[in-house]
Image: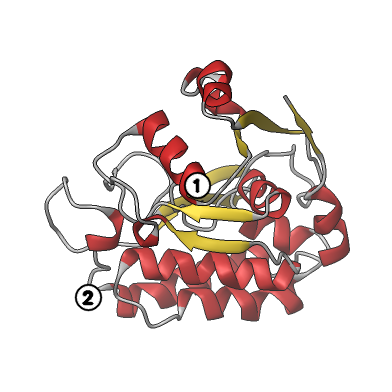
Amino acid sequence: MQPYLLPYIGYFQLINCVDKFVVYDNIQYSKKGWINRNRILVNGRDDYFTIPLKKDSDFLNVNQRFIADSYAKEKNKIITRINELYKKAPQYQIISPLIAEVFNAEFDNLFEFILNSLKKICAFLEIKTELILSSEISIDHSLKAQDKVIALCKKLNATHYLNPIGGTELYSKSVFKENNIELNFIKSNDIEYPQFNYDFMPWLSIIDVLFFNSKQDIQQFLNSYTIH
């Protein structure tokens, strides 16, 4: 999977479900998507928080991008904003220090920052899956899309590959089967919980889930999915 900044709970369901989770660090950075931004609850609606990046080529990989110098000051604004928004949430006292720890991490490399945040959340939720960097696996890294995934699976002696349900248009079960790999897709069940008195806003950053739910409830959410 691509590295995402404090992604939605479905990302952690996938990590929790597998034996090994390969994080793409040598994949091209994209401004669109969730690599250095995500959504939180703001007065009943969703709004973004973003890690600012140094200006650089749009063709660089994620592990070649760096966090802007301005982040040293901006991180305090991000932390303060999140605390103000969630200070009345039931898990605030437990989660606020964890969120501050994530945003205060002293990494200037974007990928290292994201990887650290994934490890912090996994540790809190007691997810013990091994996280592996794609660049450290000896394959032909010029391969793209499905071919690259199959090469990674073979190198790791994988017999089963699990991908989010959105991958049904990207990957072919028959092609994986030809390579002696079973392909399945994980689909999150509808997960809903009280967000103050607002109408429920689904699939926000894991930040939202953490503030509103106990660790035990979230661990149950991690198993709330179907395999296709």
Residue at image position (37%, 62%) is 136
Quarter of the picture containing the C terminus is top right
Residue drawn 31% across the image and 73% down it: 71
Q: Kindly report the distance in space between the C-alpha atoms of the residues bearing marks 2 and 1.
A: 23 Å
From this view, report whether residue 209 is shown above or below residue 188: below
Question: In the rendered image, which quarter is residue 63 located in?
Answer: bottom left
- In this image, 90 relative to 63: left or right? right
The residue located at (61%, 64%) in the rendering is 130
Discs 2/1, front: 2
Q: Residues within 10 Å of mark 2 (few under 14, many from 20)?
A: few
Report the residue marked by disc 1. Answer: 47
Residue closer to the observer: 219 or 102: 219
- Label 1 neighbour load within 10 Å: few <14, some 14-19, many 20+: few
The mark tally for this picture is: 2
Give the x, y percent position of residue 174. 56, 16
User: In this orientation, which residue lies closer to the viewer: 190 or 126?
Assistant: 126
Q: Nearer the viewer, residue 29 or 160?
A: 160
Question: In the figure, 220 relative to 167: above or below?
Answer: below
Instruction: State left or right for residue 155 relative to residue 219.
Output: left
Amino acid carrying mark 1 in the image? Asp
Q: Position of residue 68 (x, y in %)?
A: 23, 69
Residue 73: x percent and y percent?
A: 32, 79
Secondary-structure class at tag 1: strand
Left or right of 33: which side holds 177?
Answer: right
Residue 184 appears in which quarter of the rendering?
top right
Q: Is residue 1 visible?
A: no
Residue 55 position within the rendered picture, expressed as x and y whole percent measured from the top left: 14, 58
Mark 2 highlights which residue? Answer: 69
Q: Is 41 rendered above or below residue 89? A: above
Q: Earlier in the sequence, mark 2 or mark 1?
A: 1
